[in-house]
Image: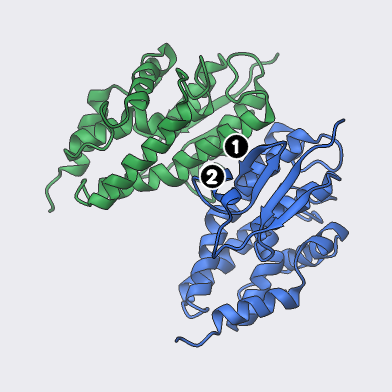
Chain colours: A blue, B green
Amino acid sequence: MATQEVKVFGVWESPYSKRVEIALKMKGVEYEYVEEDLSTKSSELLKYNPVHKKVPVFLHNGKPIVESLVILEYIDETWKSGTPILPEDPHERATSRFWANFVDDKLLPAAVKYLKSKGGEKAVNEEISELLSVLENELKGKKFFGGDSIGLIDIASNIIALWLDVIQEVVGVEVFTKEKHPKLFKWSEEYLNCSIIKETLPPRADLLAFWQSRVQAPAA
Amino acid sequence: MATQEVKVFGVWESPYSKRVEIALKMKGVEYEYVEEDLSTKSSELLKYNPVHKKVPVFLHNGKPIVESLVILEYIDETWKSGTPILPEDPHERATSRFWANFVDDKLLPAAVKYLKSKGGEKAVNEEISELLSVLENELKGKKFFGGDSIGLIDIASNIIALWLDVIQEVVGVEVFTKEKHPKLFKWSEEYLNCSIIKETLPPRADLLAFWQSRVQAPAA
């Protein structure tokens, strides 16, 4: 096969960008990574994602694809070799899509509220805790949401395994703990321990410093 | 093949419920339709969609699937015969998913704001008009978003073809017109003229009466 152009435009601190890189590594696809500066978005980013103007952008032989979950499906459909990202069975595929959307549509907005309120709104903290319990229930004794190996829901849940844990340390109000969510906490440990995840997600200390500087910066 | 259980729980006035019925008709799949009363949700609805407690719910041989776009993908994967809902090419599939999400994530929230403000917020009206122009641009001279026949984006855009047109008549402030969006307006006419769409979407007069009673009801 002729050399393919496979490019990811992302930012290192984005759980969405990391989803795409994880999927490519699961498929064993070589890619070029371009770190974007969101304060001065590149002309390429604006050209390839004129509607949302956001990362990640995935470029395959000149054709752009945007939105991380859409990119993940594309990668799974394009590179059949490597680890599958979605299961084969249509009902299991639908279940995967449902929970990946749950993370994006329910958990992420709640996490943003939690961050903005710096853990100061009890209702928001309880909302996150409940959403995590709902998700935990879906694990049903499996090692990963995908079963024995990681899949779409696991990759979508980057935000829980690393980002939420870091942010609750910065904020100082715990919403995701071993006591409250034992199975999800165990999942998180197993997930972060996967070699592909370890080599792709940013070091915890770097992300902690990033969020500390954002959240704890004194008002000017 | 043994008789299959195929059931849709919906409400007649929902563009989301109608998406599922359209997809089933495109595949030639017989189904049982159950009209829900959202003021007293049935125990079946709550059992099958405990997370969101919303219609549509799709039931196939006892297994529930929820979220209209997830259901549409399931239907396309399960019944390979009949009209395809998504194209075959991975990049075209990604494009379809992107624009269907655009309708749900961008256009629908704007339409809700438009409805709540009864067209009284100029910025909201302009936002919708711009979003429609962005979507119109995607038509690129095609009869439907799916090409010569309707596909995922067309089905997702039910809201534009019928609901938005009805709501702007109720509200009395035009945001979607032949003058502003000539290609999308033409698409809308073509779409509503498809036999499957005509027999599935509610009569315009009924939807108009429904929204008139909601929007124009005097405050108690």
Real-space Cα distance between discs 1 and 2? 8 Å
Q: Circle 1 sits on which residue?
A: B64
What is the three-letter code of the residue carrying label 2?
A: Asn
Q: Position of residue B192 (x, y in %)?
A: 36, 19
> Residue B93 falls in which quadrant of the image?
top right
Q: Position of residue A40 (x, y in %)?
A: 55, 62
Query: Residue sitting at 46 percent across and 72 percent down?
Result: A123
Residue A166 visible? The answer is yes
Q: Circle 2 sits on which residue?
A: B49
Q: Are marks 1 and 2 in contact (CB under 8 Å)?
A: yes
Q: Look at the picture and state if B106 lies above or below B31.
A: below
Q: Secondary structure at mark 1?
A: strand
Name the residue furthest front: A43
Callouts 1 and 2 on one subunit: yes
Name the residue furthest top: B195
Query: Residue sitting at 72 percent across and 36 percent down?
Result: A61
Residue A177 visible? The answer is no
Instruction: For label 2, count other residues whose C-alpha is less than 10 Å away and answer few (under 14), some (14-19) or many (20+).
Output: some
What is the three-letter code of the residue carrying label 1?
A: Pro
**Could you tell whether A42 is left or right of A51 in the image?**
right
**Could you tell whether B103 is left or right of B206 in the image?**
right
Q: Look at the picture and state if A10 lies above or below A210.
A: above
